[in-house]
Image: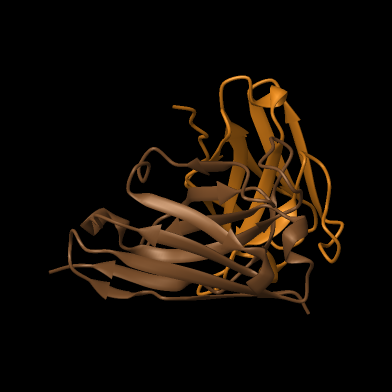
Amino acid sequence: EVQLVESGGGLVQPGRSLRLSCAASGLTFDDYAMNWVRQAPGKGLEWVSGITWNSGNEAYADSVKGRFSISRDNAKNSLYLQMNSLRAEDTALYYCAKGMYQQLEPRDAFDIWGQGTKVTVSS
Amino acid sequence: SYELTQPPSVSVSPGQTASITCSGDKLGNKYTCWYQQKPGQSPVLVIYQDTKRPSGIPERFSGSNSGNTATLTISGTQAMDEADFYCQAWDSSTVVFGGGTKLTVL
């Protein structure tokens, strides 16, 4: 069974940092691009960042550019999101989502999602 | 920045056809996909590349995309289809989601 399991969420003060992880199993992890998508309480989906299969290319939403950094370790079947300078508006459930191709490309969609890890930014 | 617009809500009677639209500038020139999200659950991909259904998605789900509008159609809607639906497309190497549509089956 293909599974994505996020971890690392929690309560953090504004301006501080947090690192999220996503552990993949049941798939050939390094065959696919991976993404982070978040959902604020009671709100819709917002794409955060994506990374190609070999870490050759990364992309970020304008709302997090310069503050967040995506990475992956294919040897560990893991995806990461380093979140710095956190703001109250970053409060959300963060999902790890698998792409269907190796690259970040216009035909891609997210066919496997984790259960999410909750991040709360508050003093 | 690119925007995708969905109606906040759509209602349908059981057994009838539900249509959920997603509008964006020249959206027909892009690939659109659709996700279903039930309360307390993670999103599920139901349509990708405008018209394709992933394995395990019922045939009553179908999609189209032309001009400025993509449409998700659910034929013979069932009570279990009640959920939030999100469209998604790529623009300039970033991903854009629509605001979501709450489908009510009543």
> Residue at point 73% right, 65% down?
A29
Front-most of residues B24 and A105: A105
Front-most of residues A72 and B73: A72
Rendered-image quadrant of the N terminus of chain B: top left
Rendered-image quadrant of the C terminus of chain B: bottom right
User: Is A10 above or below relative to A55?
Assistant: below
Q: Is residue A55 left or right of residue A100?
A: left
> Residue at point 52% right, 41% down?
A59
> Residue at point 63% right, 43% down?
A56
Residue A111, located in which quarter of the rendered image?
bottom right
Q: Is residue A120 left or right of residue A76?
A: left
Front-most of residues B86 and A23: A23
Chain A appears what colour?
brown
User: Is A105 above or below relative to B73?
Assistant: above
x then y, percent, for residue B73? 74, 46
> Residue at point 32% right, 48% down?
A67
x then y, percent, for residue B74? 75, 52
User: Is A117 above or below relative to B32?
Assistant: below
The reply to whether residue A40 is in sight is yes
x then y, percent, for residue B96? 53, 39
Q: Chain drawn orange, letter?
A: B
